[in-house]
Image: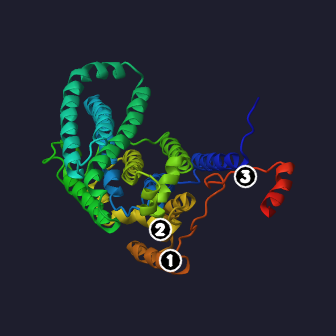
């Protein structure tokens, strides 16, 4: 009647929940300070971003430097939604982005099925068709959002303040992930045809473009509340249950990634990394799986950006600059390419060492030397363990196990040698 719970699953989730509860208790006791609590939350956010990049680079073999750009898109999208609600009781940004992700997402799915049947259609022409459809549905979403904003304002305003903000916050984070995912799909159409190195350069260029747009978001894009290069303030900070929200999204991302990799989609994704030509020969649609992986990885980055905006409560374009865009890549390489366990461990280790341990060890006035000390540590580690801290190691629950071989009946086993002899 009752299905037996897998031991590895019980240990894994028990360990995660235990880790969360220990940190929560230590916070209540004052042993974990607010500074250290913020670092742990940021480590969890970095783990979500890095799991997305590991999916793209470690498991699918696409060298991408654009993860930080989608992280920035998610952060500013979620922050704008909650900023307008908490300061002006305005849901216009929420409704416009909600309608946009629904309508544009539906259009992308329909167009993808339709255009995939057309032979001879090049990637650039398909990109133009998708882009025109996106602009049209975004314009329609702006009109629909303007019509329904007063009714939505009244409906949410009638709820208790904590409940209305919780609804807006959760929707903002989810919408931020979907916005990043759909932008990644549009961006990936022309650039996913490039080789690995050229694809990395193209995604790096994308991150730089996003940073420049954020520098001019108040003038060029018209979002005055973002304040461009001065930085966005007034973002509501989630203090009471921020650790719970961040960790809950982290657990969801871990489970989704694990289940994806253990499915037939996951085996196809990994086969593209191992040998793209052989994958094509086996009938695998390489373009589809590259796009799927890139979109899911960017979705995770957008979710992480939405969470980061409310952990930090302040956004500045310099947070998403060229140098910082290497953070998730450092984490993935440090933990080990193709290792979810390594990525999770390295995310916490990276921030705890750089932002907490080295600050405690280095003398006053030499805090910036931590950006010299840690690269030296990373260089030594890469010389000693080129595959990263964990290599291809996975915890039992995250590791994909082969099904046990079926034992042949005794009669068949006895007859097999006789048949072979004949």
Please give the name of the residue rendered at 47% of the width and 43% of the height, measured from the top-left corner: 242
Point out the image quarter for the N terminus: top right
The mark nearer the N terminus, 1 or 3, is: 1
Gap in Å between the C-alphas at discs 2 and 1? Answer: 9 Å
Location of residue 170 in the rendering, given as x and y in whole percent from the top left corner = 42, 35
> Going by the image, does 422 lie left or right of 108?
right
Q: Nearer the viewer, residue 400 or 87?
A: 400
- Residue 382's tag is 1
Compare residues 63 and 162 and report the one nearer the observer.
Answer: 63
Q: Which mark is residue 404?
A: 3
**Residue 191 appears in the picture as rendered:** yes
- Residue 355 visible here: no
Task: Using the image as rendered, state which of residue 319 and residue 355 is in the foreground.
Answer: 319
* Residue 130 image offset from top left, x and y in percent: 23, 42
Determine contact: label 2, label 1, CB under 8 Å: yes
Front position in the image: 141 or 320: 141
Measure the alpha-carbon separation of dots 1 and 3: 36 Å
**Residue positioned most to the left:** 219
């Amino acid at each position: 009647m009752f299905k037996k719970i897998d031991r590895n699953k019980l240990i894994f989730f028990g360990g995660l929940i235990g880790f969360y509860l220990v940190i929560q208790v230590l916070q209540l006791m004052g042993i974990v300070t607010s500074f250290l609590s913020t670092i742990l939350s940021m480590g969890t956010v970095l783990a979500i971003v890095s799991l997305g990049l590991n999916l793209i680079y470690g498991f699918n073999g696409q060298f991408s430097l654009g993860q930080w750009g989608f992280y920035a898109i998610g952060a500013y999208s979620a922050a704008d939604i909650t900023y307008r609600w908490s300061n002006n009781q305005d849901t216009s940004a929420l409704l416009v982005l909600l309608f946009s992700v629904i309508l544009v997402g539906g259009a992308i799915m329909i167009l993808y099925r339709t255009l995939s049947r057309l032979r001879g259609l090049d990637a650039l022409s398909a990109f133009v068709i998708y882009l025109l459809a996106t602009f049209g549905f975004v314009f329609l979403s702006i009109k629909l959002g303007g019509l329904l904003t007063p009714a939505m304002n009244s409906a949410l305003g009638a709820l208790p303040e904590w409940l209305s903000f919780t609804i807006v916050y959760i929707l903002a984070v989810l919408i931020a992930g979907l916005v990043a995912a759909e932008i990644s799909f549009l961006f990936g159409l022309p650039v996913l045809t490039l080789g690995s190195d050229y694809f990395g350069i193209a995604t790096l260029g994308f991150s730089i473009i996003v940073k420049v747009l954020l520098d001019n978001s108040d003038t060029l894009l018209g979002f005055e509340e973002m304040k461009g290069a001065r930085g966005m303030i007034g973002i509501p900070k989630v203090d009471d249950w921020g650790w719970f929200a961040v960790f809950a999204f982290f657990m969801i991302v871990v489970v989704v990634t694990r289940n994806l990799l253990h499915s037939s989609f996951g085996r196809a994704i990994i086969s593209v990394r191992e040998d793209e030509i052989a994958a094509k020969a086996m009938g695998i649609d390489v373009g589809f799986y590259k796009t799927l992986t890139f979109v899911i990885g960017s979705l995770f980055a957008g979710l992480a950006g939405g969470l980061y905006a409310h952990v930090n409560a302040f956004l500045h374009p310099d947070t998403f600059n060229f140098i910082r865009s290497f953070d998730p890549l450092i984490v993935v390489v440090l933990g080990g390419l193709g290792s979810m366990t390594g990525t999770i461990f390295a995310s916490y280790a990276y921030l705890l060492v750089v932002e907490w341990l080295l600050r405690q060890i280095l003398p006053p006035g030499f805090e910036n030397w931590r950006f010299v000390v840690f690269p030296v540590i990373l260089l030594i580690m890469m010389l000693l363990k080129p595959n990263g801290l964990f290599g291809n190691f996975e915890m039992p629950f995250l590791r994909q196990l082969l099904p046990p071989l079926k034992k042949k009946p005794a009669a068949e086993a006895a007859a097999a040698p006789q048949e072979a002899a004949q």
